[in-house]
Image (cartoon, helix red, strand yellow):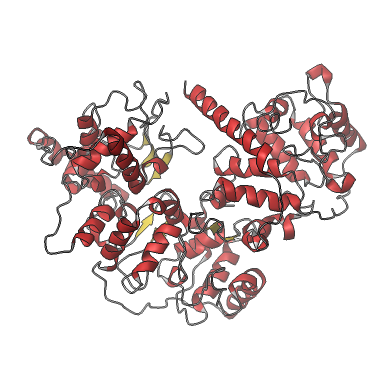
Amino acid sequence: MKRLTLSALVVAAVAATAVYVALKPAPDTSPASPPGDAPGDLVARGEYLARAGNCLACHTAPGGAPGAGGRAMDTPFGTIYTSNLTSDAKTGLGQWSADDFWNALHDGRGRDGRLLYPAFPYTNYTRVTRADADALFAWLQTLPAVEQPNRAHTLRFPYDTQAALLAWRTLYFKPGVFQPDAGKPAEWNRGAYLVQGLGHCSACHAPRNALGASTDPDALAGGLMPGQNWYAPSLASPHEASVADWPQAEVVALLRDGVTPHATAAGPMAEVVFGSTQYLSDADLNAMAVYLKALPQTRPVKNEVAGVQDELRRERGAQLYADQCADCHGERGEGRPGVWPALAGNRAVTMVPPANAIRTVLGGGYAPATRGNPRPYGMPPFAAALSDDDIAMVVSHIRGSWGNGASPVSSVDVQRLRGNLR
Amino acid sequence: MNRLSIASTARALFGLLALSATTTFAAPGEHPDIDLRVKACTGCHGAEGRAAADGYYPRIAGKPAGYLYNQLVNFRDGRRQYPLMSGLLQTLTDDYLQEIARHFSALDLPYPPPVRSTQKASVLAHGERLVREGDPARDLPACASCHGSALTGVAPALPGLLGLPHDYLAAQLAGWKSGIRHAHAPDCMAEVARKLNAEDIQSVAHWLSSQPVSQGGKPAAVLEKPLPIRCGGVTEAAR
């Protein structure tokens, strides 16, 4: 499998190199900033857009200076370190022009012309308009200069080569600003622009192939996040995280507050709400909700239950649930409204990939603290208290009880997802 | 350069913290439902945060609020590294962490008797000497010179050292020595721990974990003497 991937990449690299001369940076066809945007407004708009793109979440190391980069992003191809976006002339963007920034955001090229790694989601950001890119750049230039040299990525061969990137781009990247659909309402188009562009929802919520590319990102059909061991559920599947049937106000509430009467943002999505969507205007959140609710849905199919557990494991799972979980989540998985989520009929529990249910038991977690929910409830981690096998049995119990009807999980599933949680 | 800018950020952050530490840790129990909201903590740290002295997790009930708050922020922001703690705190605000710190700090709960040590008397004696007197020859201050002569800490930011498990104490000292655990700069505990050898660490952890908790574990209100060393997040808060 791996060898196949590699040779495919090499073939593609050769092919791509052949057409290299024919490739030029995409011409800049979109208009510059609208005239009359005062400098202060431009910066404020840029700051808002940076929230929409959650730029600082990745471009800030834990405990580091905002925007100075250095956060490690684990990928299946090695580790990428985010770059310094502050106004420092030597190590940040201090010497960049708005055109340089546009080339990075729109075309995935650094100031020196080198191709950037798509861990920087320029496959999404290419849809951002030039006017918004200029606003973002104006704001970035106001970030206090922090002299912090960018750390070299540690990627395996051949992924560490420009040829590999060129091949990847030839296969999977086409620069292009978002084009509104004249047949759709303005609100839908605004939502699409945010979801597909700065929001870069597909970076997590779309499946990736062996080369880390999404061939149909806008379907938001769900994807495993290899570096984080979470599953970003499908927003198109009624079995996973589709919001087609939700009241619009609840979609907005989840993005703004991180919690609704029926759902809680957890794991990486809690970070998205915490760092990004809670700051968006009601108009933009409503636009995103309109667009997400209208996503083409996959046909509902009955989840098939694969595998059964023997009597002893079932009993042990039920006992663990009674001892460790029932106090908060209730004897019948009913939860406590407004405090502890119900587990019966909870899609985060029943969806086919069990990753999130397992990760939640391993690491626990708090809903994000937001203006709408400043003092969230939380769940303790069980990674240290329970073995892989115990977690497998209790998660299997939860997935199989109260009409949930989902397949059991194995201790190997837990071990694979455990990562550094122990 | 890298280090310089991080240090200056840390200093800036520290300034803010010192400010907040002196102004905010006041009225406990403003929200009656807080005990439900900290169930994520008590899963490991024991009911009401009073973990027993025989496991790994430290007791948090009754610790100085400033100390608890500093630790929560350190875990969230990567100065202390324990993925379960960092993961839990990633999306919580300073305000909420202060409330959580105040909640646990205000709990006044009895301590269980200590675990009886099976160590040799010479090991315990070495530990006790370092704790009470330090080692002037190695420029090593006594633990008691900062953590109080009763070793129950000093409000608002210096933690007590009693009623904690041996494994936890030894892991913290080793973590500071090896650079895994950090506090706000200047990181005085790192400076102290670097002067300890493995035998010192074991002796100190064994002796401390075998002592009964005096004064109900309550931190002293004020420092008896000025700190012998500058400590980030502590010196200013304790003024």
Residue drawn at point x = 20 percent, y = 41 percent: A131
User: Which is more toward the observer, A265 or A129?
Assistant: A129
* Left or right of A412, for residue B74: right
Q: In this view, does B166 lie above or below A97?
A: below
Where, by quadrant of the figure, is residue A150 drawn? top left
Where residue A361 appears, as percent x and y from the top left, is: 55, 62
Residue drawn at point x = 60 percent, y = 32 percent: B14
Q: Can residue B61 be seen in this view?
A: no
* Left or right of A87, for residue A196: left
Q: Is residue A321 above or below residue B138?
A: below
Residue drawn at point x = 62 percent, y = 45 percent: B72
Where residue B42 appears, as percent x and y from the top left, is: 68, 58
Judged from this view, the residue extending furthest toward the right is B121
Where, by quadrant of the figure, is residue A365 drawn? bottom right
Total numbered circles: 0
Where residue A232 appears, as percent x and y from the top left, is: 38, 59
Q: Is residue A408 visible?
A: yes
Residue drawn at point x = 55 percent, y = 29 percent: B12
User: Which is more toward the observer, A64 or A259?
Assistant: A259
Judged from this view, the residue extending furthest toward the bottom is A403
Where, by quadrant of the figure, is residue A347 drawn? bottom left
User: Which is more toward the observer, A141 or B52?
Assistant: A141
User: Which is more toward the observer, A247 or A85?
Assistant: A247
Judged from this view, the residue extending furthest toward the left is A22
* Left or right of B177, for residue B151: right
Q: Is residue A300 above or below residue B155?
A: below
Where residue A392 appears, as percent x and y from the top left, is: 54, 67
